[in-house]
Image (cartoon, rainbow, N blue to C red):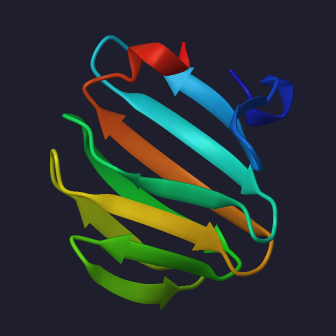
């Protein structure tokens, strides 16, 4: 498998993800458009967000920070979170268990 050969899916407006699934996890490489928003939500999946490039405003459990290249954010199961791309961004998310709705 090579990332260049995976077709992106627009999972929500402005969030274009290249998805890799195993039985127990999902890995998503996102290209995010400037000003694209993820509304507050929560899910059973544990998640790790890695900012590869750009500035991303992220609210986790009511606390807002702006993250940049190299920042990593662990997100516990069912913890409310939301985000907004301050600039065009490249992000990587890891979810466990797998996000079946992203298949």
Q: Quadrant of the C terminus?
A: top right
Left or right, residue 56 beside residue 100: right
Position in image of residue 53 (x %, y %): 70, 74
Q: In the rendered view, would you say 101 is above or below 42?
A: above
Left or right, residue 53 beside residue 24: right
Q: Quadrant of residue 33?
A: bottom right
Q: Quadrant of the N terminus?
A: top right
Depth order, front residue of 32/59: 59
Residue sticking out furthest to the front: 39
Q: In the rendered view, would you say 9 is above or below 57?
A: above
Q: In the rendered view, would you say 103 is above or below 29?
A: above
Residue drawn at the location 47% of the way across and 49% of the way down: 93
Residue drawn at the location 72% of the way across and 61% of the way down: 36
- Count the marks: 0
Position in image of residue 63 (x %, y %): 28, 84
Depth order, front residue of 9/39: 39
Q: Quadrant of residue 2?
A: top right
Position in image of residue 15 (x %, y %): 71, 47
Residue drawn at the location 63% of the way across and 45% of the way down: 29
Q: Quadrant of residue 5?
A: top right
Position in image of residue 95 (x %, y %): 34, 37
Depth order, front residue of 38/102: 38
Residue drawn at the location 84% of the way across and 34% of the way down: 4
């Amino acid at each position: 498998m090579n990332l260049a050969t995976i077709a992106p899916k627009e999972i929500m407006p402005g969030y274009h993800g290249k998805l890799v699934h195993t039985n127990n996890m999902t890995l998503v490489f996102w290209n995010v458009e400037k000003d694209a928003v993820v509304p507050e939500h929560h899910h059973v999946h544990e998640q790790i967000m890695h900012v590869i490039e750009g500035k991303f405003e992220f609210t986790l459990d009511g606390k807002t920070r702006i993250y940049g290249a190299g920042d990593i954010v662990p997100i516990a199961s069912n913890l409310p979170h939301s985000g907004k791309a301050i600039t065009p961004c490249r992000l990587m998310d890891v979810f466990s268990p797998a996000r079946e709705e992203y298949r």
